[in-house]
Image (cartoon, grey):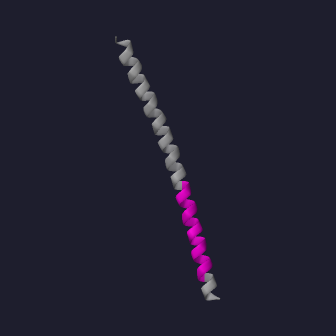
Amino acid sequence: MKKYLVLAFLVIVGLVIAYLTFIIAAIKIVIGSILLGVAAIALLAVWIMWKIDD
């Protein structure tokens, strides 16, 4: 009986770690996308300012 409890505990811990890893990766992807958008807007602003000076 103890062996099954340990196995069940390890499976549950593994699932929790996998879930948390997925959530953290999703949060990092969202933050990265937002920062990429900000960088693209900044680059566009610099390009427009550079074109206006001509």
Q: Residue furthest right?
A: 1
Which image quarter: residue 40?
top left
Which image quarter: residue 45?
top left
Q: Is residue 17 magenta?
A: yes
* Horizontal side, residue 43 vs residue 23: left or right: left
Which image quarter: residue 17?
bottom right
Q: Residue furthest top?
A: 54
- Up-down relation of residue 50 to residue 19 (above or below): above
Q: Look at the image and tell me in which quarter the N terminus lies.
A: bottom right
- Residue 13, image x, y percentages: 57, 71
Q: Is residue 37 magenta?
A: no
Image point 50% across, 40% down: which residue?
33
- Residue 14, image x, y percentages: 56, 69
- Up-down relation of residue 6 to residue 29 (above or below): below
Please state the extent of the stretch shown in magenta in the rendering. 6-23
Image point 54% across, 50% down: which residue?
26
Q: Look at the image and tell me in which quarter the C terminus lies.
A: top left
Image point 60% across, 73% down: which residue?
11
Image point 57% across, 76% down: which residue?
10
- Up-down relation of residue 54 to residue 13 (above or below): above
